[in-house]
Amino acid sequence: MRSRLFWNKFYTQRYLFLMLAPAFILVLIFSYLPLAGWMIAFRDYQVGQSLWKADWIGLMHFKRFFLESNDYIYLIRNTLVMNIMSLTLCLFSGCCFAILINEIRSRFFMRIIQTITFFPFFISWVIIYSIVNSLFGVTTGVVNELLLSWGFIQEGINLLGDKAYSWTLIVVMDVWKSLGYNSILFIAAIAGIPPELYEAAEIDGAKRIAKIWYVTVPHLVPTLIVLLILNSGWIINSNIEQFFLFTNGSNWEKMEVLDMYIYKFGMKLLDFPYSTAVSIIKTFVSLVILLSVNQISKRATGSSIF
């Protein structure tokens, strides 16, 4: 009986499933079929050798990561610190910026500000690095040259090379680049708030700040929670293009993250089994974080994605 109902529903919605088919096939081919390659992490594979002829070694590469080296300590530290700071500040700044944008009375001026803040989202990290290097380079940076000429500093500030500035630099770049994009999501949530709530608050004597605090902010909390849950699974993942550009010999101790570590052993040292093992660890940690945050949110606020 259930099978019959299922196929009846499938037939009535066949056009929707047909529209979904291309996306499903792409995800299957590029996201799920490659998981068969995880087998390489459990074999003693060498470049040029057949995967099936490589000796089975079990969890040796996983033990190598956790027991034979202390790399995981600073790798997990760098990855979690920068990504958690970036996620928190990006969502919080996007929420606050959306509220400020919504309070602008001139719609023309509001659109101009939205366009300006949204533009960095489309700029590649290569161009962003060039801009930062031109502004804050030790010897040729415009900012350093001005500060030196004005006598505010005695020597140039090595913003790109000094590891003391590494975490702050990455977080600030992330917030600046994603501010406009994140604000659009919250602006859409604000647009869905019934105008009657603002009118009722105004009748009760609420001023602009009170209406923001008691009407706008509570309606943005569910959106904020959903975005937090969706992005929590990416806390352990980093933008390799960004870190590839901003990591150098002076700041690698604070800048090397799991994705850069996997790239180093996989693409540079050609140690595919070890890099695959680290990638598997990263994937399962991401999954655990996503499920944990979703469950915590479900119990604490009643909001969750599943």
Image: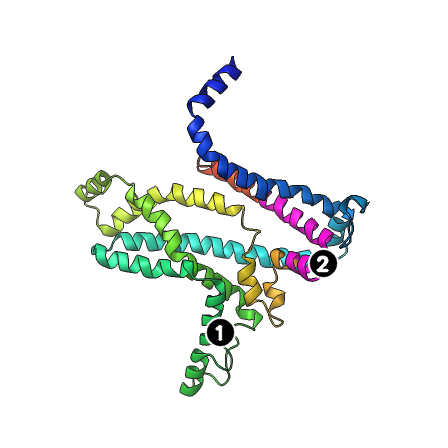
For the question of whether residue 56 can be seen, the reply is no
Please rate how many residues cluster around mark 2, counting C-alpha atoms within 10 Å: few if below 14, some from 14 to 19, many from 20: some
The percent position of residue 111, horizontal first and vertical second, equals 27, 56
155 left or right of 73?
left
The percent position of residue 35, horizontal first and vertical second, equals 65, 42
Residue corresponding to mark 2? 270
Between disc 1 and disc 2, the foreground one is: 2
Q: Which callout, 1 or 2, points at the residue further toward the start of the chain?
A: 1
Question: How is this picture coloured?
Answer: rainbow
71 left or right of 154?
right
Three-letter code for the amino acid on which mark 1 is drawn: Asn
Residue corresponding to mark 1? 133
**Region of the chain picked out in magenta, as a range:** 262-288
Q: Residue furthest left?
A: 203
Secondary structure of residue under mark 1 = helix
Q: Is residue 200 above or below residue 1?
A: below
Q: Residue at x 35, y 44 (%)?
A: 220
**CA–CA distance in space, label 1 to label 2:** 31 Å
Please rate how many residues cluster around mark 1, counting C-alpha atoms within 10 Å: few if below 14, some from 14 to 19, many from 20: some
212 or 206: which is nearer to us? 212
**301 is within the stretch colored magenta:** no
Asked whether disc 1 touches disc 2, contact meaning CB atoms under 8 Å apart, the reply is no
The percent position of residue 199, horizontal first and vertical second, equals 19, 41
64 or 267: which is nearer to us? 267
Three-letter code for the amino acid on which mark 2 is drawn: Leu
Image mark for residue 195: none
